[in-house]
Amino acid sequence: MRARRTRFAAVLAAGLLALSACGDAGNDEGDSGPDVEVEKQDFESGTRMAELQEAGKVKIGVKYDQPGVGFKSAASDTPTGFDPAIGKILAAKLGIDAADIEWVETVSANREPFLQNGTVDFVIASYSITDERRQVVGQAGPYYVTGQSLLVAKDDDSIKGADDLKGKKVCSVTGSTSIETVEKKYGATPAGFDTYSECVDQLLNGSVDAVTTDAAILLGYAAEDPDKLKVVGEPFSEERYGIGYGKDHPELCEFINESLTSAFEDGTWKEAFDSTLGKGGGEAGDPPTLDPCA
């Protein structure tokens, strides 16, 4: 665990320096992922894959406010980032072109409801895999592994890591695993908002002491405002991003895992990372090990 934390910290430091230098983590240009070839497969009749392929469209829930991960500017029609890139790979395996994806803005608190009521077919929204979530929805993957970290004001030297959070007001999104961790494990006073952008605004105006979530997300915000924000400390959790789907379609698990395995092997996954999060100088590393389907 110590070695893993040290490796995470080194990656974070390198990534932050590179992101700060380029300052374009939220730029829509060039971070939409690789071009993927649409495939027509012979899915078993009655499966959700066959239904989606026949419909020729798919609804995918992603974040709109996480530079590098899932971001949509007011001037753009489609979101960009690593998560939308993974969505395009998945759609292509269903025989659906990227132009026929209906992107749905999804925040942390509505990910399960959106899957349960059919608002979306998949959620790819920095969606950490947990046993609790798997009780109510399906989660396949992980397609990416990161760690929880802290974003603070550039001139704040009182918070250097998670052990300094006791009594501090820390913001994260309502319904996230991050806010539970800092409250229960580190004694922070939680401040929940609907989006990370709101949390960053609270940090900039001095209403909270820190923002916490996955390091990949925080690095994007730090890169947008490097004179006022910084990421501190070593990651203090492991977050495994999964793809959410409706529990009434369990066959989607094997389809997702097979699609991710193919993307790992043919280099598409690495291309997706390099063209989005990798723009900050980080390295994709080895693809994660997928959880077996139940």
Image: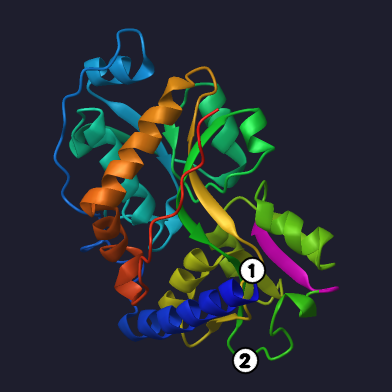
Task: Name the residue located 14 percent from the left edge and 40 percent from the top edge.
Answer: 37
Say left or right for 5 vs 51.
Answer: right
- x 67%, y 73%: residue: 210
Question: Front-most of 225 and 133?
Answer: 133
Q: Secondary structure at mark 2?
A: loop
Q: Which mark is residue 211?
A: 1
Crowd tier of the residue under label 2, counting other residues whose Cα lies within 10 Å: few below 14, some 14–19, many 20 or above: few
In the rendered image of this protein, does residue 11 appear above or below residue 237? Answer: below
Q: Position of residue 97 (x, y in %)?
A: 18, 34
161 lies above or below 221: below
Assess disc 1: are there few (<14), some (14-19) or many (≥20) residues with their C-alpha within 10 Å of its C-alpha.
many
289 relative position to 148: left or right: left
Res 261 visible:
yes
Q: Position of residue 274 (x, y in %)?
A: 28, 65
Q: For residue 111, which quarter of the picture?
A: top right
Label 1 to label 2: alpha-carbon separation: 15 Å
Check if residue 22 falls in the magenta segment. Answer: no
**Badge 1 amino acid:** Val
Q: Please identify the quadrant where the C terminus is shown.
A: top right
Left or right, 258 with reference to 177: left
Judged from the image, the secondary structure of the residue bearing numbered disc 1 is strand
The structure's colour scheme is rainbow
**Residue at 52 percent of width and 17 percent of height:** 248
171 drawn magenta? yes
Can you give x and y, in whole percent of width and height, for residue 9 in the image? 54, 79
User: How far across and down, in percent of the image, does residue 13 sit?
Assistant: 48, 83
Tell me which numbered mark, 1 or 2, is placed earlier along the sequence. Answer: 2
The chief SS type of the magenta part is: strand
User: What residue is disc 2 on?
Assistant: 155
Mark 1–mark 2 CB contact (< 8 Å): no
The stretch in magenta equals 166-173
